[in-house]
Amino acid sequence: MTKQHANWSPYDNNGGTCVAIAGSDYCVIAADTRMSTGYSILSRDYSKIHKLADRAVLSSSGFQADVKALQKVLKSRHLIYQHQHNKQMSCPAMAQLLSNTLYFKRFFPYYAFNVLGGLDEEGKGCVFTYDAVGSYERVGYGAQGSGSTLIMPFLDNQLKSPSPLLLPKQDSNTPLSEAEAVDLVKTVFASATERDIYTGDRLEIMILKADGIKTELMDLRKD
């Protein structure tokens, strides 16, 4: 009789979807609150959005244990930065720190798919999208997670970001107003929830502006 080994993996995928849209003076970051494994729902009220600094918010899907470990590392490195520079990190600086942190673990990666949103030094919205090993890009909008394949074509159709190959470089930020961007986010999640079993229960939306952060909630499908 052949010996059978347990098919064990150090990773799991807890599903969920994250979206961010950058505007002229705001950034909208949204994620659903469902956390699953396989066909089981572990929690219907799990926030995937984490505030890293006053002007930088991280939203992550993938393996939530790795996401928590990543957030802990970023928090401690940001604290060291604040002690050394007597100020908080800007969103582009936090984007570089996140890239370096993910790349450092490239041989045993954090199984986390991140979207970082916030405001840059000029007060304009910025979104950075990542792979698991730290390759990143500044974009006008981005999506990660189990519903991203349904949401990105919708956002591409509605927002039509200019090609990064165009010269002179075009501004990738969306021309939408803050209210229109929030409505668009609600629409894409309502659509994705119809087809993706790992996205649902509730939608959490954070709106970053120079004067602070607002949070909105919206119910999604619970089945």
Image: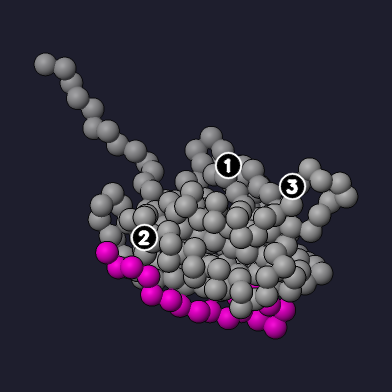
Q: Tell me which corner region of the image, top left, top right, bottom left or bottom right, holds residue 25.
A: bottom right
Q: Please, what is the three-letter code of the amino acid marked with disc 3?
A: Ser
Query: To which residue does mark 1 refer?
Result: 133
Q: Nearer the viewer, mark 1 or mark 2?
A: 2
Q: Which residues are magenta?
A: 207-223
Q: Quadrant of the C terminus?
A: bottom left
Q: Is residue 164 left or right of residue 130?
A: right
Among numbered discs 1 and 2, the one appearing first in the sequence: 1
Which is nearer the eye, 10 or 194?
A: 194
CA–CA distance between discs 1 and 3? 24 Å
Q: Nearer the viewer, mark 1 or mark 3?
A: 3
Q: Label the magenta part by its dominant secondary structure.
A: strand
The residue positioned farthest toward the left in the image shown = 1
Query: To which residue does mark 3 refer?
Result: 163
The residue positioned farthest toward the front in the image shown = 157
Residue 96's mark?
A: none
Q: Quadrant of the N terminus?
A: top left
Q: Position of residue 167 (x, y in %)?
A: 86, 46
Which is nearer the eye, 167 or 86?
A: 167
CA–CA distance between discs 3 and 2? 30 Å
Residue 194's mark?
A: 2
* Residue 152 in sight: yes
Among numbered discs 1 and 3, the one appearing first in the sequence: 1
Q: Position of residue 145 (x, y in %)?
A: 47, 52
CA–CA distance between discs 1 and 2? 30 Å
